[in-house]
Amino acid sequence: PKGRYEVIPNPVDIGIFKRKVTVDKGKERIILFMGRIEWRKGVYDLIQVIPRVVKEIPEALFLFCGDGEVEVALNRIRESGVQRNARV
C-alpha cells in the first residue's frame, strides 16, 4: 500500500571494489560465492561438490570472494584437486 514503506538505498559504495581475479569472458560457467568464508555459510559444502560439477561441466569456474577462513578454503580446494576450477 502507498505510504506504508520506505526505500532505503544500498549503503555500500560498489565503486570501491576492484576486480582482483582475471577471468576470460569465454566459455566458462562462473559460480560465484560472495560472503564471509566460514562453515555456517555453506562454503565447504560448495567446495565438496566442485569435483562432481566439474565432471559434468569441465569449464565451470568457482569464485569465492570474501574474508574469513580463506586458508581453510584453499586447503580444502587443494585436497579436492580442483585448483584449476576454483579461485579464492
Image (spheres, rainbow, N blue to C red):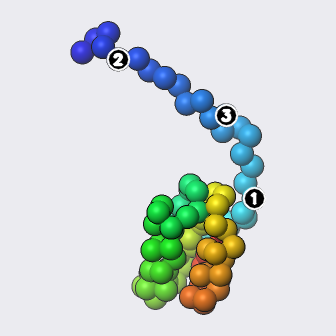
Query: Residue 12 location in percent, x, y?
Result: 62, 35
Q: Give amino acid for label 2.
A: Tyr
Which element type, helix, strand or loop, lies under badge 1? Answer: loop
Q: Which residue is mark 2?
A: 5
Left or right side of 83 for 33: left
Say left or right for 32 vs 88: left
Place of residue 79 in the rendered image (x, y in percent of width and height, measured from the top left): 60, 89
Depicted 10 relative to depicted 78: above or below: above
Q: Is residue 31 above or below residue 54?
A: above
Residue identifier under label 1: 20
Instruction: Report which residue position mark 3 lands on.
Output: 13
Q: Residue at x 30, y 14 (%)?
A: 4
Asked whether residue 17 is in view, the answer is yes
User: Considering only order in the chain, which callout, 1 or 2, is on the residue closer to the N terminus?
Assistant: 2
In space, the residues marked 3 and 1 are separated at their CA atoms by 17 Å
Above or below 6: residue 61: below
Q: Quadrant of the N terminus?
A: top left
Percent x, y for residue 16? 74, 40
The relative height of residue 51 versus residue 37 in the rendered view (above or below) is below
Residue located at (66% from left, 58% from top) = 67
Question: Residue 37: image x %, image y %?
Answer: 58, 62
Neighbour tally class for label 3: few under 14, some 14-19, many 20 plus, Cα within 10 Å: few
The residue tagged with tag 2: helix, strand or loop?
loop
Instruction: Report the Cα–Cα distance between label 2 and label 1.
Output: 38 Å
The image quadrant that residue 83 belongs to is bottom right
The answer to whether mark 2 and mark 1 are in CB contact below 8 A is: no
- What's the residue type where badge 3 is placed? Asp
